[in-house]
Amino acid sequence: MTGLYTADQVRAAEAVVLARTPEGALMQRAATGLATVCLRLAGRAVGLRVTLLVGAGNNGGDALWAGAILARRGAAVTALLLDPDRAHPAGLAALRRAGARVVTAPDAAGSDRADLVLDGITGIGGRGGLRPTAAAAVADAVAGPGLLVAVDVPSGVDADTGAVPGEAFPAQHTVTFGAVKPGLVVGEGRGYAGVVHLVDLGLELGAPSARRFGDPDVAARLPDPGAGDDKYSRGVVGVHAGSATYPGAAVLCTGAALRTRPGLVRYAGTAAEGVRAAWPEAIVTDGRPADAGRVQAWVVGPGAGTDDEARSVLAEVLATELPVLVDADALTLLAASPELAHDRSAPTVLTPHDREFTRFGWELGGDRVGAARSAARDLGVTVLLKGDATVVAGPDGTTFVNGTGTPWLATAGTGDVLSGVVGALLATGLDATEAAAAGAHLHGRAGQLAAAGGPLIASDLLRHLPTAVHLTTGRGGGLGGSGA
């Protein structure tokens, strides 16, 4: 599991190391790691044309020290000092000793001809977009053929939130120090960070601000059935979705629940005929949730409408003592009557996209992690905020940022699939916030598989879910438990 740490958390951990190590040792450790990654990416040192974009402070110092290492290895290094009077003195001296060029005029930097451009303009404390001179230097670099590598965090990207309020450095790779910062994996910042490489500085970090599941973490939450299991002990999920006129959401949601290995899936709703035809494995009822039989979690809302009947069903499900996932149309209804979820003792998971999120009166802004946390705390629920990097926040502040997926998932029906996946995990008894995070991970994995050949449709995810489960767990898939 990858921990995500804010700039303040990293600074506090660095302060401990700085107090017990020789001056400059931590920076040189970071610069060595940075130079090592750059050499691996470039594949050579001798003759490599490198431009350093150097701002004030320690981030610029990291770039200068790394440039000195590259120059000593045979690279032709030029440093553009964007704030000459505030350039890191020791780093600048080391760079000059290594024989590198130092310039202060952007047109002398050669950014448009470099093989490698290092962004050391601003660090984790940077706020706001790039200043005009820095933005012009970045534009020159982008116009050239060079590999674009950010030092710690791309300049212009907020390290904590991923907000990009102005011009920023569009890195293809980011070499970050000590810990992965949230802004590298969420919000607009994710698109500017490229591939993230972590250089371990030996920091003693406490509890992370947020976490990101890897395959082993999800696998640990998807145990294989034991010899004594049957379909009831493996989790029974109920689905109320779709309608007779629009059965697609019901078919997708039910199919996704089945493919996520619960013991049993029960469907209740007016799309019963379509669900029965598509999924003979499900137990289908043409009625209300109360008619479905015993379940251990409910999914309600996808394609179910927003009329009085739909609101009555939502109220009925939320009045139970069972975990409930609320999606799509049911989110619209809940936004108008949030009291239906506010006082629940059982877990509730909301799965809004941005527009559904703001219907509750919650502000999104540039801090998606903070917005999801605030909403979860406000309503006492788990919020799965869909997006390029889905954020999951629990009512206690526990937060996950999903690390799988593809932009091709931005198509109709994929949210219905996600709801079915998470609902199935809720039915196994998994903690609601972890179920939502694990479900987002599996959904993203299936999307990556489905998009390998290009555009996808939601039904493609159903075909790839068993493979996604297999790849994540290293074990075979299947539709249910071992008993009848």
Image: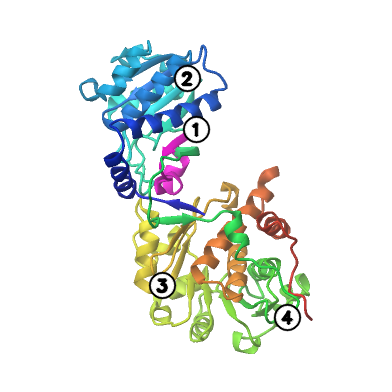
Tell me where residue 43 sits by quadrant: top right
* Residue designated by label 1: 172
The part of the chain drawn in magenta is 172-192
Q: Measured from the top left, where is residue 448 in percent x and y? A: 64, 49
Q: CA distance from mark 4 to mark 3?
A: 31 Å
Q: Amino acid at mark 4?
A: Ile
* Residue designated by label 2: 144
Q: Residues within 10 Å of mark 1 (few under 14, many from 20)?
A: some
Q: Earlier in the sequence, mark 1 or mark 2?
A: 2
Q: CB atoms at circles 1 and 4 under 8 Å apart?
A: no
Q: Which residue is depicted at the point 45% across and 25% down?
A: 142
Q: Measured from the top left, where is residue 473 in percent x and y? A: 67, 58
Of badges 2 and 3, nearer the viewer stands: 2
Q: Quadrant of the C terminus?
A: bottom right
Q: Is residue 444 above or below residue 157?
A: below
- Between 347 and 459, the one lying in front of the other is 347
**Element class at badge 1:** loop
Q: Is residue 325 above or below residue 87?
A: below
Tell me where residue 282 sits by quadrant: bottom right
**Element class at badge 2:** loop
* Residue designated by label 3: 335
Q: Earlier in the sequence, mark 2 or mark 4?
A: 2
Q: CA distance from mark 3 to mark 1?
A: 40 Å
